[in-house]
Amino acid sequence: MKTIDLSQRIEEIELALAATFESPKSPTVSAYQEGATTFLTLSWVVKTGRDTTLDTRCVARLEISDRQINHYAALDTAKRRIVQDRLKDLLRQRVDAMRSEPGSAENCSLQIDIDDAVFDVPDEPYNI
């Protein structure tokens, strides 16, 4: 796969993740590669005030291997959308679970190592 194609596929995932949570301000998503791993960091505001330096933000960092990115890039558009939805659902579930634990309502920072199964999409019909 060409480098530019991989960059476009990573950007696709970034754009999908940016729409995961409602936020009074625009969420930010960044990606960087370290070795054979791509790290995607999503940050969104959950509470804001007049002074933006006091915004309450949540941060989630997803670790995706090169093998997973290459597998994702080789999928057709419909299957890539399914993977994007799975990533968003996984992220929502992890954040909800983390924030529902006793004494952690204010905790909003997590790291997720993405499992290979997220990227395995069967042929039609797409059973999720």
Image: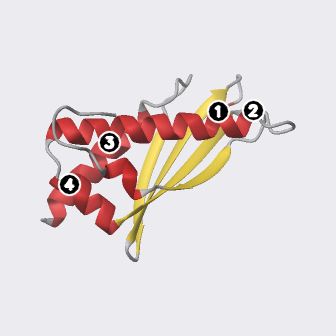
Taking 20 as reference, is 94 left or right?
A: right
Inter-mark Cα distance, 1 to 2: 6 Å
At 29% from the left edge and 48% from the top edge, which residue is drawn? Answer: 11
Mark 2, residue position: 100
Q: Are marks 2 and 3 in contact (CB under 8 Å)?
A: no
Image quadrant where one finds the N terminus: bottom left
Q: Image check: 1 left or right of 23? A: left
**What is the tally of numbered marks visible in this picture?**
4
> For the view shown, which residue lies furthest in the right direction?
103
Secondary-structure class at tag 1: helix
For mark 3, does the 10 Å Cα neighbourhood hold few (<14), some (14 to 19), or many (20 or more) residues? Answer: many
Q: Is residue 53 visible?
A: no
Q: Which residue is mark 4?
A: 73
Say which amino acid is labelled 4.
Ala
Q: Residue at x 30, y 67 (%)?
A: 67
Mark 1, residue position: 96
Callout 1 touching callout 2 (CB < 8 Å): yes
SS state under label 4? helix
| Nearest to N terminus: mark 2 or mark 3 | 3
Residue matched to label 3 = 83
